[in-house]
Amino acid sequence: MSFGKSLLLAIVATLFLTYVFGTGFLQFADVNITMDGEFVEPIQAISVSALVMLALVLVGLAIVLSVFGSFIFIAVMVVGTLAMVTIGIFWPILLIALLIWLVSKEKQPEQYS
């Protein structure tokens, strides 16, 4: 499963579980949420808090992916630089080794079935 599908499935599951357990808890604990003196329905109270938490999780995910993405990018650049410097310094030796390998390679006799 791709990362996008997994992320979307996790978001939907989180919203569903938050809704189910949130409304169940509010009804079980007999909690009434008021805003400006009016009662807020449990569905609205849970859905708003779930959307706020979802936004915070996505912001955190973006920060984590950008930080680790930067570290991975820097590591790939360092390894690539070292590889290019090594090839740049030792290219005559590598060329001679390749030529020796090509010339001295034993020819295998062809086998007929």
Image (cartoon, rainbow, N blue to C red):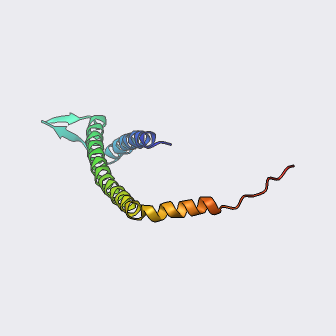
Circle count? 0
Residue drawn where x is 42% and y is 65% of the image: 90
Residue 41 image offset from top left, x and y in percent: 27, 34
Residue 106 position by quadrant: bottom right
Q: Is residue 97 above or below residue 2?
A: below
Residue 45 position by quadrant: top left
Q: Nearer the viewer, residue 89 or 41?
A: 89
Residue 37 position by quadrant: top left
Q: Is residue 104 above or below residue 39?
A: below
Is residue 106 left or right of 57 when viewed as pictured? right
Residue 72 image offset from top left, x and y in percent: 35, 56
Is residue 38 left or right of 23 when viewed as pictured? left
Residue at the extreme right of the image, as rendered: 113
Residue 40 image offset from top left, x and y in percent: 23, 35
Q: Is residue 29 above or below residue 4?
A: below
Q: Nearer the viewer, residue 82 or 49?
A: 82
Q: Nearer the viewer, residue 31 or 7?
A: 7
Residue drawn where x is 26% and y is 46% of the image: 59
Residue drawn where x is 38% and y is 64% of the image: 89
Is residue 27 left or right of 93 when viewed as pictured? left
Residue at the extreme left of the image, as rendered: 36
Residue 82 image offset from top left, x and y in percent: 36, 62
Residue drawn where x is 38% and y is 45% of the image: 21
